[in-house]
Image: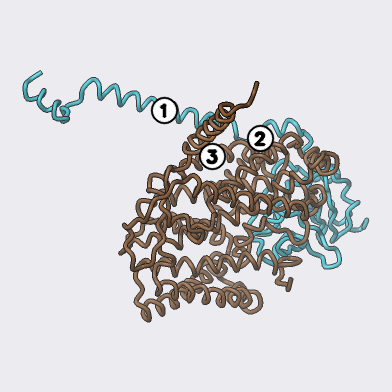
Chain colours: A brown, B cyan
Amino acid sequence: MGKGRNGILRVVKGQERYRRYLNTFILHFRPRTVPEQTLRFTLTWGLGGMAVVLILMLFGTGVLLKFAYHPFPDKAYESILHLQHDIQFGQLIRNIHHWSANILLVVVFLHFLRVFFTGAFHPPRQFNWIIGLALFLTVLFSNFTGYLLPWDQLSFWAVTICTGMFDYIPGAGLWLQEMIRGGPEVGPSTLTNFYAIHTVILPALIIAFMPFHFWRVRKAGGLVIPRTPEEDSETRGEMVPSIPNLIVREIAMALILIAFILVVSVFFNAPLEGKANPGLSPNPTKAPWYFLGFQEILLHFSPLIALFFIPVLMIIALISIPYIHYPSSTAGVWFVSSKGRRMAIGATVAALIATPIGILVDEYVVDFAVWMPGLSPVISQGLIRLGIVLAVFYGFYLLLKRRYYANKNETVQVVFCFFLTAFIILTITGIWFRGSEMRLVWP
Amino acid sequence: MSEKKRKKIKEGQFPQEPSRRSFLNKLWIGLGILALLEFALLVMAYLRPNKKETKSRDPETIIEAGPVAKFPLDSVTAFIRGKFYLCRLEDGGFLAVSRRCTHLGCTVPWIDKEKRFACPCHASAFDIKGEVINPPAPRPLDLYRLFIENSIVKVDTGRRIKRSRFRADQVVYAKRVKHETLEN
């Protein structure tokens, strides 16, 4: 067949048609147009998109790992060794899964901070904040359930102490613990449970919650429009077509992220210690890094306070953030206002100073159990300490409020910054500053 | 149907008195909730760890530790299979102490030099009777039922017994204590 002018035209037309098909396909899950201002990188930092890419990478590598892994205590560890040594690219696949999972936690956390600090939880985005929290929890538990699967010393003992924390939840704690472990101790049933939860239940939940999360963004008319405090929230700039403006940005971000994960996975192996030995606890035994903030709290407060009251309070506080009655919506404004920004910095600095001092004083000076031997540990180790922390915070809070006359938006932000910074410091202490027998050490 | 009623229905205001339709609707909703509850119960019962099964699989929950004379006074012997320590106190009494730390469940080794159990995870420490000498452990090490038959020490590892403090009646003595101590 001769390729004349008509032939070339046909080919071009064909290409045009396929591109149209592709575009309409993309428009099934991306909006047709988006406000130009929301494309600004410093609004979202690409964090939501990164989370999606990481979850897809995790699904992909997770399915591959499923072909090599045996979820039985006498085979699990060997199957990981086999995966790493005998299967082509086995180590790389495991590394990608490991690093994607850990980076996902960081990305999801930063995304959570971005949404909070741009006020993207004000109506009509209130409920999407809750879905976001649910997704955060599923990601956290995915990571935790996956932690046990290699069945090495690291994973066995981390899961032993984390599930051991259920001992202290009043009422249903022991029952819950036995349900999760599938028996009184971490053993074969625990591995079966965690495997089923990690590979079926949590992925299913994530697949259900993710579209819900995106749909609520669409229902809210897209992302918050970035603005200064003086600008009106109703004004919307020019709309631009998503293809190519949004899609190209997303693809670029995804490719950079994938390249980064691959480079990290080539050079750094996922950790694997000796096979799990129920008779020998390593010293020190630590929870996974994202739970070390709680483990650190547990070193300072009685278990009931540390493992029940504080987490419950945290969850209630986070859920209520969008439903508090605010004087004004600050959607799209970074850090509420310029005053809010100064106060946020103040709270962060205060927590940066107060938390390490608190840890050091508690480690080397304070010993309520010895000073007040008659009291029950719940009071001496729990309530008194909690009271001191809250009193110090309340004093600081009054100081800010009296001096700056903060409104409710700014106040909530100050409280958030203070406790968030404290929790991050506690987590860092747990990761790097706790050595043998969980004593304070210099890293 | 009266003219008034018809008008109300047209305007979207339905009659208040219970009709057959509303009764049947409620019935279906009720049945639906019942079905959901049944499924929930079924799933819970299915997932519940089966105690009978684990027992029948491992019938030897009673472990024969050995003759009384084998254990010197003020000594601790580890039984790896039973996951417990057999402690013989200075007065000749026996205790079967769980090796599981009461704080978060790490395995505690016996440090013979310091005469104490020291948890490597969070630095809890226990004495030979299992009593806490260093927090954060909230209560003494758990016990297993121990009995002595024909001067043979036996431990029932089927059930862990929690205790809030050490009491003298937890210690088990061989019948002829004086004779045993003379032998040692």
Element at label 3: helix
**Neighbourhood count class around disc 2 (C-alpha, 10 Å): few under 14, some 14–19, many 20 upward:** few
The amino acid sitting under disc 1 is: Leu
Pointer 2 indicates a residue of which chain? B
The amino acid sitting under disc 2 is: Lys
Q: Quadrant of residue A32?
A: top left
State how far apart marks 2 and 1 are (Cα).
28 Å
Which of discs 3 and 2 lies nearer the camera? The answer is 3
Residue B34 shows which numbered tag?
1
Which of discs 2 and 1 lies nearer the camera? The answer is 1
**Neighbourhood count class around disc 1 (C-alpha, 10 Å): few under 14, some 14–19, many 20 upward:** few
Q: Where residue A4 sits: x, y (%)?
A: 60, 27
The reply to whether residue B97 is visible in this rendering is no
Depth order, front residue of B6/A103 = A103
Q: Which residue is mark 2?
A: B51
Q: Where residue B9 sits: x, y (%)?
A: 15, 26
Query: Which quarter of the rendering shows the C terminus of chain A?
Result: bottom right
Depth order, front residue of A202/B25 = A202
Q: Residue at 71%, 34% (x, y): give it.
A: B54
The reply to whether residue A112 is visible in this rendering is yes
Query: Which quarter of the rendering shows the N terminus of chain A?
Result: top right
